[in-house]
Image: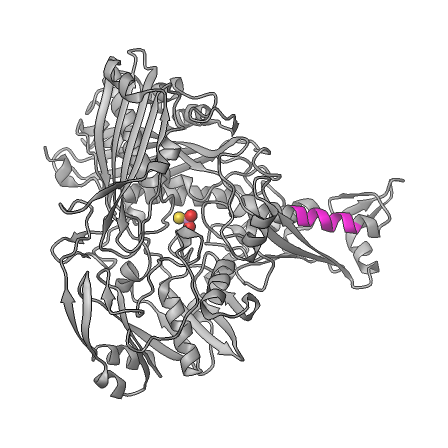
Amino acid sequence: MDGGIGLPVTRRDAPGKVSGDAQYAADFPHAGCAYAALTTSSIARGRIVRIDTAQAERAAGVQMVLTHRSLNEGLGEETFAMKGGHMQSSFLPLTSDEVHYAGQIVSLVIADTQEQAEAASRLIAIDYDAQPASASMDDGDRVEKPLESKSIDVGNANAALAISPVTIDATYVTPAQHHNPIELYATSAEWREGRLLVHVPSQWVMGTRMGLATIFGIPAEDVHVECPYVGGGFGGKATILPHTVLIAMAARRLGRAVKLVVPREAMFTVGSFRPATRSRVRLAAERDGTITAVSHEQAGQSATIDHVSFAVTEVTARMYASPNIRVRESTVATDVNTPGFQRAPAEAPGFFGFECAVDELAVALGMDPVALRTKNEPARDPVGNLAWSSRKLTECFARGAELFGWSRRTPEPGSMVAEDGALIGYGCATACYPSASGPSAARIRYSADGVCIVSLSAHDLGTGAYTVMGQIAAEVLGVPNHLVRVQLGDSTLPSGIIAGGSVTTSSSGSAVHVTALAVRDALLRAAGGGELVDGFVVSPDGSRRPATEVLAECTSGFIEETGVWKPDSISDKQMQNGLAGGMAFSSALGKYATYSFGAQFAEVRVDPLLRTVRVHRMVGVFDCGRIINPRTARSNLAGGMIWGASFALLEETQIDRKRARFANTDLAGYHFSTNADIGEVVVEMLDGSDTLANPIGTKGVGEIGIVGMPAAIANAVYHATGVRVRKTPIQVEDLLV
Ligand code: MOS
């Protein structure tokens, strides 16, 4: 068996991507296609009082100019994804003269060529009535709105904080950040006899299909969304971006295919982003390190057009054993495009402050940070007293410390110096991510030629779904790897789940598993009984024959089954909605508390004079349940850790506060890690199947890698320099003190 579960099978999508055969959304040809260019608002809030499109309409090749004046389509109601719909925002540009944020789409020019569309879009003249606006949650007039429903109180944290001998009270901030995948947002849309074909980079083709069907008032079957490959998603491609609706509408009006590729600058405002956060963390402990109170209050940046919150405190409240826990969430509305999902949306920023505070507590106690965390490991969920489906965080820390060489650490800041004089810092942090799952379907065809085709409309964000879905089928059916084919990212296939929330393998992988079992059972029925062992049917009498021989005897020459899987906590009704393209997830808190865990370590080297910080090496040890493919899982986790380093030291969408807009809207101004910024990255995954989570025993891998890294690095910077930086990115000037 060279292609089953647990093997480091190489990526099925790799040859196509390397050779250029793989077609990304914007690569699909559409006969007679016209091209679109966007104009976006130069003000952040107010009204369009005049928009003159006459010159643009007369320009060479122009077919159509859409503005708020021309859009009167009578579109169907579709809501914001975080309110049960599919849209990235509840506001659809071009539906009114109002401007809610800088960079909002205010017109769309369609022409015969891309160049003509762009040239004409520059001829549109717009006058605005601009109102005062703010894009920063720190601007004075911004009101913080508490989210009562997100509060958690166990015991009395305030009382414990008042009487405990050792306490920490600190506030940490993280800035707005943008996903910036290599593959730009794009949409091609074409109508054929009332049916809509869309190519769009998508983490959710079924949701996109359902949403577009609602908007255009047509049956879901009449919408075909195709996206076999995603060139980086990170959450930004999980929902329907408004321009996709506008392009589909333009194509319908023109009676011609239309394609838009969003330029990099507009990527910052026509989609979503990771909002800024402010966290106040208070911790209390006895002198022996027993934590007596955990209090975490987080405020997150939201938008005036959409109330969005990413409540990390549901997770941080469950990290350590404490008799007293108090968490609060609030939002601060700003005049920006709607914030959205970005890898570990709540956890990546929220764990920065929380895990820095735990480090500060260790310093205050004079205790080793690993020992402090291990001492306060909770036997059960400290909020709801649920049993963990699995939680091996202590083992993660023990193994991580060993791999990292944590015992070499001398606790005094600045006490470790490299041969070249650089200050060495060692830091660590806990990582955690909820492990949810949702309903999914899959189809498997196993043919007499030995080929096994696995088909479902799940997605591979480049992280391994093409590979692992095949491995799960291969494991059950005993099919060699070179005979496995996997089809994903097409809404005509059986319904896969959204590629979000780290749910793909647990959900769609479980669907592939039950479907493979159904194929196996059908095969054995056809063979008149027996067992399937390594691709051979073994009869009760001990005789063996290849499964392909049995398949050849089937009239059709193959066996095909379609199977569905859902978590127990999802009702049949929720399942039907989920399979149709609605959002249907289990909670991580069901009968058990189900989370992925990790222990993350960083070594930084700080120049003693220049105070530049280098990430010398990172170690992450994870408890993510059963690992279907150690190669792709490792890459996924390492990618998250690299992003975590980027988060700690480089990433910030700067805000021009006077003009209330994002300032560094290109890849020259928006900094993130490149190869030269990253030293050694070591990833290990603990063995162990979490069969309480789902039948294949997996927990989420996709997002946890980033979660603890920013704090581990900040804690390492403190250890190197003695300077506690409570914000990201940590920059040279923060250390010049
Ligand atoms: Mo992920 S941020 O849930 O797409």
* Residue at 43% across, 57% down: 86
- Asked if residue 197 lies left or right of residue 354, the reply is right
- Asked if residue 86 lies left or right of residue 630, the reply is left
Q: How is the image coloured?
A: one colour
Would you place residue 548 above or below residue 397 in this image? below
Q: Quadrant of the C terminus?
A: top left
Would you place residue 411 above or below residue 175 in this image? above
Residue 65 at x, y percent in the picture = 30, 80
* Residue at 63% across, 44% down: 4
Splitting the image into 4 quarters, where does residue 152 fall?
A: top left
- Asked if residue 13 lies left or right of residue 451, the reply is left
Residue 223 at x, y percent in the picture = 52, 69
Q: Nearer the viewer, residue 666 or 657?
A: 657
Q: Is residue 103 visible to the viewer in this orientation of the structure?
A: yes
- As drawn, which residue projects farthest toward the right? 541
Instruction: Confirm whether the magenta stretch covers residue 378.
Output: no
Q: Nearer the viewer, residue 144 or 506?
A: 144
Q: Quadrant of the N terminus?
A: top right
Q: Nearer the viewer, residue 564 or 699?
A: 564
Splitting the image into 4 quarters, where does residue 718 fall?
A: top left
Residue 283 at x, y percent in the picture = 28, 23
Q: Nearer the viewer, residue 497 or 304?
A: 304
Q: Is residue 1 visible to the viewer in this orientation of the structure?
A: no
Residue 282 at x, y percent in the picture = 26, 25
Residue range of the region highlighted in magenta in the rendering = 514-523
Splitting the image into 4 quarters, where does residue 298 fall?
A: top left
Magenta stretch mostly in which secondary structure? helix
Would you place residue 371 above or below residue 644 in this image? above
